Structures are given as C-alpha cells and as structure tokens.
Image (cartoon, rainbow, N blue to C red):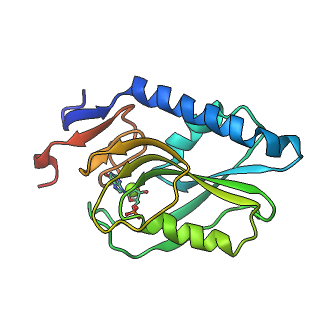
Amino acid sequence: MHPDIERIVFSEEEIRARVAELGAQITEDFAPAVARGEQIVLVSVLRGAAMFMADLAREIKLPLAMDYMVVSSYGNATTSSGEIRILKDMSEATEGKHVIIAEDVIDSGLTLSYLLRLFEHRAAASVTVCALLKKNVKGQVHVPVRYLGFTCPTEFVVGYGLDYAERYRNLPYIGVLKPEVYS
Ligand code: IMP
Ligand code: MG
C-alpha cells in the first residue's frame, strides 16, 4: 500500500468486479436501442473519470463512441467551490444519441446536475448517469443516477483516477489519505 494511504476503501478486485457488473447491466439495457440502429456515446468528465470510463467501456459489449468533457468545480482543495465551468466540450454532437455519462464521484452533485441541464438542451435520445461513487452528503443536489458502483464514505478519497492536488490518480485502488498529507 502507498505510504500516504491510511486505508483502502475499495480494492482493485472489488472495483474490477463492480465495473464488470455495471458494464453487463448497461449492455443488457442498451442492446435493444443498438438493435434499432441507435447510437451510444459514453462521455466522461476528465480527468477523474477517465480511468473508470476506460474500464467500463471494455465491459460494455456494444458498439459505442467515447467522448470527453473537462469541467472544473474543484481547485486543489478538498471542498467544492460550487462554481462549475466547461473547460472542454464534447468533440461530437450528441443529437439523437444515447448519452451515458461516466462520472467518478458525486459529492455536492453540482457538476452532474449542471451537465444534465446542459444535455436537456442538446436533443440527445437519452441521458443516463453511471457513477462509480456517490457520497451521502448533506445538501447534495439530487441527481438521477441509473447506475451506481458504490456508496462512498463521506471522506476525501483518492486513487483509480481520483486525485489530491493531481497526485494518486494511478493507484489501482480507492483509499483515504492520511490526515498529515493535507497539512
Ligand atoms: P460535485 O460537483 O461536488 O459532485 O463534485 C464532483 C467532482 O469533485 C468529482 O468529479 C471529483 O473530481 C471531485 N471530488 C469530489 N469528491 C472527491 C474525493 O473524495 N476525491 C477526489 N475528488 C473528489
Ligand atoms: Mg478532481
């Protein structure tokens, strides 16, 4: 285990198994749409969700496109600023497509509720959220999550794409940092 990690919350094996289940469920649910000739686009919010989406994509046994957005709601701090900005939008139009948003973690819910509102104006065939983690925090904005990996403790976690000040994204598990790392 990395010396800055206090404890592992979700192990590499647990994550792999859960992502496989999510992919199988999405495959089952979207197979009829694909059979009708409709298109799926998997979208991730960089950078935290990139690893999750890469693994999820390989577990969805259907043709799909992959696209990326960069949205900012956090600086290098561990609490939400409440301010969301689009730094990079999707490369392809979403019109008529089934959009599946792969998100790393829902905390305040501000990022996803903003994105969902945005997609309402973009005439997608459907918009679905697949989040790896969701924290049960007070005052969280309600976000309809169709696919959820795990409920996450309301602590700041890192690994499997999640960072603290751009570090720890490449840890293969999700864990809690030792308090002295913040101070
Ligand atoms: P929300 O808008 O507050 O739901 O924040 C979602 C974004 O904040 C996520 O996509 C992450 O980038 C970041 N975030 C929230 N909680 C954590 C955490 O525990 N570790 C790392 N990043 C987090
Ligand atoms: Mg982040």
Residue beneath the point at 66% across and 72% down: 120
Q: Position of residue 91 (x, y in %)?
A: 71, 61
Above or below, 125 relative to 179: below
Say which quadrant the C terminus sits in.
bottom left
Residue beneath the point at 28% across and 38% down: 175
Furthest residue toward top? 13
Residue toward you, 26 or 67: 26
Can the viewer see residue 72 in this picture?
A: no
Q: Position of residue 28 (x, y in %)?
A: 70, 35
Furthest residue toward right? 37
Q: How many marks?
A: 0
Say which quadrant the N terminus sits in.
top left
**Left or right position of 155 against 62:** left
Above or below, 143 relative to 163: below
Question: Which of the 4 image quarters holds residue 76?
Answer: bottom left
For ligand 1, the image quadrant comes to bottom left
Can the viewer see residue 165 in this picture?
A: yes
Q: Position of residue 111 (x, y in %)?
A: 46, 66
Residue beneath the point at 75% across and 61% down: 92
Q: Position of residue 32 (x, y in %)?
A: 81, 41
Residue toward you, 170 or 34: 34
**Left or right position of 161 against 180:** right
Above or below, 127 relative to 171: below
Residue beneath the point at 58% across and 67% down: 116
